[in-house]
Amino acid sequence: MKSNNTKIRKTLALLFDMFQSHNKLSITDIMKLLRCNRTSAYNYLKRLENAGYVFKKIQENNRTFYSLVSTDDQIPELISYTPMTADVLRKFAIIRELQNGPIKKDTFRNHFTIYKSEEIHDGDGRIPLDIKITQYYNLLNDLLNEGEIVLNAADQKYYLTGKSIPLQIRLHEDNLINLQIKLSTINAGIPYYEQLQELYSKINILLGNLDHDTPNVQNYLIYGKKMNGLSASSVQLNKITDCDYKNKILCITYFNSHNDTLTSYIATGMIIYSVEKDKFYLLGAEYPDGIVSSNQRHTIIDIANITHVYNIDAVHTCYHSAYFQTMFDDMFSISVEPPTKVIVAFERAANIERKIKYLQMQRKNARVQIQDDTILYTDKISGLADFAQYLRQFGRSAHVITPLSLRERMQKSVELSLTRYKEDSECSKLL
């Protein structure tokens, strides 16, 4: 609350200066100068009136202007500032030391030279403070009470909260490279996928790994765009959740990518949000011949395309069933295509090996084998086009060992060179 009051005081002081330098201001002028909305502009004006200022309304060309006609010599207490004192500067010196990271309570005192009779500044890198030990601890307690720093009970370390001074994070290049490798293995469909891709692009730029052919660069250029998938699908989501979709078969009317209107009977398996596409999808089992038929096929519907939903009396046991959980685990992106076993051979190098191991951590069915200078990655994947796009980053270092039909599908997105291994190798099963 204290921090918010300080912001209001500064804004009111700025508004007061505006009226001092302008003969008149409209609400629109105040909105532009303060960068606030109309309601806030009226509220700031009202606060100045409550503080003792008098304004005159002027009508010109159907617009209302306000002019300051009575002021006091003194700025009201409401918009006064806290004076800069020696203690404020001393507290700043203490806070600055914590910007390098948390420090143990028992050793924090040793970071400073506290001037007293038996202690002089010996030039050992400690920060000199022109106070005695008691005043130092009083300042430390003030910072704790003001919420500027916090003492963690678990590790007994002081941490900077960032309340007044922004936190500064120092990241070594090795840590940056490791983070880049972790982010390069994330899969479409996981939470915050698009935001993580944008962060991945920023890190690549910092490391100088800028590739204008990857979509990540575009993600970086549109960094900060608003996600509207939830608002765009909220009405349709409510239509589904108002039904007993977890237990009853739904009759859904929707339009497909060709703008054709379709009606289907569907048992809901999962409702998935893809951050990459900023869309909600319904994954389920469709009854194309009606519910009296045992014929089923898997389908994915963009929830934003749904127009009507109601449930019927027929029950199902698909929702979050083991079958659909397995289907979801196999997806490299949003896809209902049958999973295909894929084996990829990578040239063994430090960065590539780490990337593949991180990818293995993300994939439930993945397996990694290392044979001399080769890394064999085995997985069961649904959504081969997205997997091929992922393999592009490895270039000619990746060799897909797979049947011809699959190779033809993937060659459109990634340069592949087939390598035939000995009959007793793991990949020989697919040749």
Image (cartoon, rainbow, N blue to C red):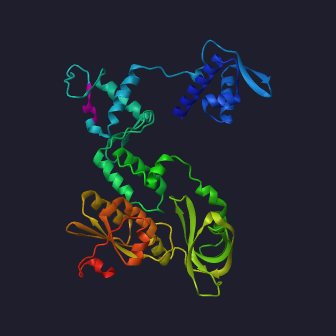
- Seen from the viewer's position, the closer of residues 398 and 323 is 398
| The residue stretch that appears in magenta | 108-113
Question: Residue 181: x percent and y percent?
Answer: 34, 55
**In the rendered view, does 109 fall on the left or right side of 254?**
left
Q: Residue at x 41, y 60 (%)?
A: 186
**In the rendered view, does 322 fall on the left or right side of 100?**
right
**In the rendered view, does 95 fall on the left or right side of 83?**
left
Question: Residue 92: x percent and y percent?
Answer: 38, 28
In the picture shown, does residue 143 fall above or below 69?
below
Q: Residue furthest bottom?
A: 293
Q: Residue at x 29, y 45 (%)?
A: 173
Can residue 192 be seen?
no
**Quarter of the rendering occupied by the N terminus:** top right
**In the rendered view, does 204 fall on the left or right side of 18?**
left
Question: Residue 342: x percent and y percent?
Answer: 37, 74
Question: Residue 98: x percent and y percent?
Answer: 34, 36
Classified by dominant secondary structure, the portion drawn in magenta counts as: helix
Can residue 24 be seen?
yes
Q: Is residue 187 magenta?
A: no
Q: Quadrant of residue 130?
A: top left
- Seen from the viewer's position, the closer of residues 60 and 39 is 60
**Quarter of the rendering occupied by the C terminus:** bottom left
Q: Residue at x 27, y 32 (%)?
A: 109
The number of callouts visible is 0
In the picture shown, does residue 140 fall above or below 236?
above
